[in-house]
Amino acid sequence: MQDLDQLSVLDFCQLDAVDVSIEVDEYIPLRVRTYKPPLGGRYVRLGGREKTLLEIILADGANIVRGWTLTSFDGVSEWPDVDLGSEGRAGVPVLAADGLDGGVRRVDLRVPFSVSLRDGMMAIWWGDLRGATCHVFGSLRFLVSNDVLVGLLVDSLTTREVALIGVGISERG
């Protein structure tokens, strides 16, 4: 399967005693992790890979979203029309990711995505956000519409981190 069914949300999982790590620099715009030692996970990759790449990291065997890396993107879009107050369940999503069966380490979805910045927040989305619910885990938000993960949001970026993301855009653009 090479479509958004790979991102179907089966459930939400609470992670005990986990610090969310958010890293921003001018080379890799955004790294988000919910684990400390290397995880050895599997990946669902979105974008065209030549100019755009978002990797969603899943825990081995359980397909629990444990982080993501935004490696490259084309530019910043307008902030999406999404109701961040429409909170769903707490926790991180557990994805279907059927394409990762049988020892496969990654699945590539040629799905374009958009990136937006606003007031210390960064949104990355690739699906229809109408009616999306916002599932919360610390400073992370998972946007889900019709039981499919359609976006990710970080709401705790500093002014410096937002500026670094901007530097990366201007250097790539």
Image: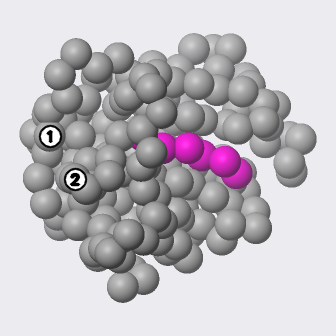
Residue 57 pos. (x, y %): 43, 49
- Residue 53 in the image: above or below residue 90: below
Residue 55 pos. (x, y %): 52, 54
- Badge 1 vs badge 2, beta-carbon distance below 8 Å: yes
Residue at image point 38% right, 69% down: 103
Q: Quadrant of residue 140?
A: top left
Relative to 172, 57 lies left or right = left
Q: Is mark 1 on a helix, strand or loop?
A: strand
Mark number for residue 143? none
Q: Can residue 150 be seen in this view?
A: yes
- Disc 2 designates what residue? 62
Residue type of the residue flagged with mark 2: Ala
Residue 134 pos. (x, y %): 23, 42
Magenta segment's dominant SS is: strand
- Disc 1 designates what residue? 13
Residue at image point 19% right, 60% down: 9
Q: Which of 118 and 29 is in front in this view?
A: 29
Q: What element carries label 2?
A: loop
The quarter of the rendered structure image containing the N terminus is bottom left
Residue farthest front in this picture: 103
Q: Can residue 6 be seen in this view?
A: no
Other residues around mark 2 within 10 Å, as few (<14) / some (14–19) / many (≥20): few
Residue 20 pos. (x, y %): 38, 22
Indicate how the structure is coloured in the image.
Answer: one colour
Relative to 118, 65 lies left or right = left
Residue at image point 68% right, 14% down: 160
Q: In which quarter of the image is residue 100?
A: bottom left
Relative to 76, 67 lies left or right = left
Residue type of the residue flagged with mark 1: Cys
How far apart marks 1 and 2 lie (CA) works out to 10 Å
* Residue 133 within the segment the image draws in magenta: no
Span highlighted in magenta in the image: 67-72
